[in-house]
Amino acid sequence: MTVTPSRPVEPPRQAEPAERSPGRKDRRGDALVAALFVSPAMLAFTVFVIVPALGGLVLAFFEWDLFGTPVFVGLDNLARLFTDPAMWQALGVTALFVVLGVIPTTLVGFVLAVVVNVNMPGIGAWRVLYFTPMIASAAVSAIIWVNLYNGRSGLVNQFLALFGVDGPNWLADPTWALPALVLMMIWGALPIVIILYLAGLQRVPEDIYAAASLDGAGRWRQLWSMTWPNVWGTTVLVAVLQAVSFVSGSFEVALIMTDGGPLGTTQSLALYSYKVAFTERDIGYGSALSLFQLALIIGVVLLSRAIVRFRKERG
Amino acid sequence: MTSRPHRVRRPTAVAAALAVIPLFAACGSSDTAGASNEVEGSTVVLTTITSLEPQFKEYADAYMKEFPDRTVEVRSTTDDGAEYAQQLATARLSEDLPDVFFNVDFLADTLAKNNVTLDLAPGIEEGKLGDLAMDDFLPQFVAQYRPLADPEQVTGLPVSADSVGLYYNKSLFEQAGVTEYPEADWTWEDMYRVAEEIQSKSDGAVTGLAAPLADGSAQIVYGPVIQAYGGYVYDAETGKSGIGQPEAVEAWTTLLEPYGTASGEYTTTGDDPTLQFSSGNIAMAIASRGAVPQTQLALTDADWDVQVLPTIDGSSTAGGGSYGLSIAQTSENQDAAWAFLAWFYDTDAGMKIAQEVGGVIPPTEDGISNGTWKDGEPPPASIEIFGESARTAVLLTQMPGASASVMAEATKKATQEVLLEGRDVAEAFQEAEETVNAAIAKETK
Amino acid sequence: MSTRLYLSLRYALVVVCGLVLAFPLLFMVSGSLKSAREISAFPQPLLPETPVWQNFVDAWDYLTPQVIGNTFVFSLGIVGLQLLISLPAAFALAKIPFRWSAVILATLVVPMFVPANLTLIPLFVVTFQLGWLNSFAGLIIPMAAQCAFAILLFRQFFVTLPPGLIDAARIDGAGWLRVLVSIALPLARPALATFCSISFLTAWNMYIWPQVVAPNPEHRVINVALAPLAGGENSVLSPAIGLAGAVLAMIPVLIVFIALQKWYIKGVVGTGLE
């Protein structure tokens, strides 16, 4: 028994203001107000984010051990990138982290947000449980997950044994270490995704559900045909944040739990850069690795946008 | 988003960022002499790593109780070596280095080379440590803080003459029905044989021996083993590492043998709980004296003890090392810092409390022989073995710049290649040796 | 399927998923009550035999009223300043048509991909040059300036506001500031609550920045004060005390989450019934 929605659902308009009124010129007054509104944030952002970021990246052209005087070495560090096999492996690991991490985190977070977005007695207390992974620091989470993943006595393998599966020694297995870390990172990332979607869901007009079906299958379809398009803006935000966190933010987890091993299979570019810069105290090359990563990301974004535009123009 | 071409050009920001660079070197080459002020009424800032903060607070409290006019403020930063280096670097950039601070083997040479740490040798000569002379300290522990470029200098003083011993859990031996406890004349073969017996008799429930090589970077264990086979980790004269030479390869083969049979499976980090003797699940483990307090806290219902490390070809395989205390070259309270160190290293003052609170073994001949460190409640009943092994211990080798950190990465990689990919031991460690030698060459060029 | 059955199933789902997600954390709370023997044991027992409340007493010793006060000043300062600078910026980017908005958005996103550990030292140098070491200004302002997330979040929210609402107000002669304060903000309550909880938590848990920029004890914040409890090879304390400290530190965060919940869940949306 499925009933299709009685009227098509129009997602809220999320286009850029600039695109919404392409012909209109900025009104002088508006531009002034906008500048006033934007400038405190941009001033702070420039001084404390952009300048330090450039300062860090410029070090790619220097040789520096943290304590001595930085020595200008031109393109030496950048040239070294292309002959370094560890760099290429780390690049692959970063790509895997993003592919395995971002999409599941986003989808599962969305579904869980819908699940807890409900008014029931005592729901508030239960909902708090969903936020708890975010509260634990990386070091504390690591202790817990190392226990869970242990090959012999860990709960994960004890659970698998119930089904007759002989689980691997997760964190020391070149095949399974990366998926194990991704699973843990998804766990840690879910709260922020759930919170963002919860906020997004509050802006979905309720009347779109009015005539929709009430049975299970219908609800599942309604979830993807009506709710999902209505939170698209949130999804974009979540995807960007998760991309940031899987590319660079979460290297801490791998550092504590596997130290990038075994055989470099969990060593992302960010972790490799950190180790080069601060363990081996070769800040210049560490910075070159980060610069390369940044260039690649900008390249991927520009390329994907070009493809989208190309398709639009053709279609 | 719009498709308008971007013009993210921020010349001002770029200029500002470039202007930041020279600041990194603000005091890089300056050798600003520190100053000496009054000792009474002084405040000395002492920075250590976080896990040592509680005990150092107690030392400072005792000092301030004895000298109410003096203040020692203990701060701690982090427990992670890389972060510690970073924070010392920022403190230096802002010319706000602590007066006295924690130093460690893998940082010592870099700090000395860049004029961060004060040469303590002249001060000790002048009697700034009271009755203590340089000769009173165990020479091999002091040697860790002698800069490679100028071995006459001493840029740090060891705090505890720590060496490793073989910890063993008698309760687990009994549980597995094994009664052959470690003896002073054991060889590594004896250790492996008994460990394997325990592990198989307990059906894998008890780990016979925590893997001695741990994650592959435990230099305190592999260093002495390589030496016992006649090899070397680093030769200061030729400036080369020998971890891929035939003698070293023999050592690696021995060290790589027990995984899965006498020891547990390989783990990718050295602080994995399956390697911790205090887990109560491990019959034997090679660990430093520093682990005694934690073990006492954790193994409350087990009967455990320590024994000297087994031998290879008749040579001892005990490794050792100590974190140290250094004085900043730029400190304006150098006399006050000296006064604190003089009190701290006095066997009847600071060292007395350090022995009680931190289980520290004084790094002096007098302290080892007559100190109170061995008078604590057992277990371990045989704690005095650490005195003997401190005297004979093979110390962590001082290596140029950050090459010791590069070596830790390289031996770990080689270990994984052998254990997880079945690569040939000699091949894997020859490659590691090349990596290390390249890093040394870069540091010394 | 009846609505009743559906609702019960859904409730069960909420509880089960919640427990799975929270399991590692419940494990930590249980760990904070374990004895030194239990916390070091491997495999670790799920629950302590007898709860060791002394762990909390020992951890409490490391917290002074000043530390707790500092952490509140630090966290609330960051949240407040970020709101102050991000809300107008986000509003302008979403609703006021002007030429630079796309460039500014790109400028906000790109630096997110530069690793924080690499920018730490340059950021420190900038703060040092401003003479802000060992001060609340140095603690708070550089962190409040990390506002890309706040601006993107609020902008995303403002973009979905119906244009008619704002046009109407504009036609009535309301200035942009007035539109922001009296129309956009009240509607943005869920976004505000979301941002405040996330930002407060992030600031509360900060560790490296306070450590580096204000090492003196007068400005110590909670995670810096609790760090010596985290254990390590040389430690003379039980690791369970460290977990007790972590549990104590998260209480204010939990309170903030619970308090702000009412704000971002507006009512009966979830049932799909009217």
Image: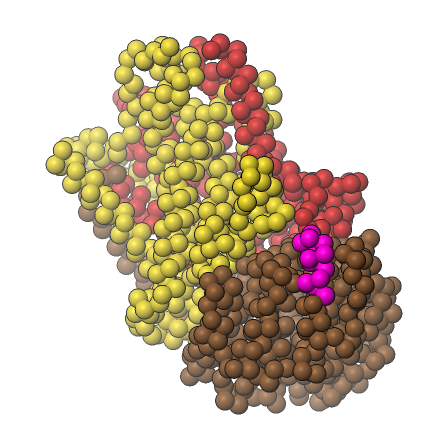
Residue in view at x 49 percent, y 11 percent: C3
- In percent of width and height, residue B230 lies at 60, 85
The vertical placement of C47 against A215, above or below, is below
- Chain in yellow, by letter, is A
- In percent of width and height, residue B13 lies at 33, 58
The vertical placement of C29 against B389, above or below, is above
Left or right: residue A309 versus residue A300 is left
Residue in view at x 56 percent, y 67 percent: B216
Majority SS type along the magenta span: helix
Is the C terminus of chain C in the top left, top right, bottom left or bottom right quadrant?
top left
- The quarter of the displayed image where residue C57 is located: top right
- The quarter of the displayed image where residue B341 is located: bottom right
Foreground of the two, C173 or A6: A6
Foreground of the two, A286 or C159: A286
- Chain in brown, by letter, is B
The part of the chain drawn in magenta is B194-206
Q: Chain C is drawn in which colour?
A: red
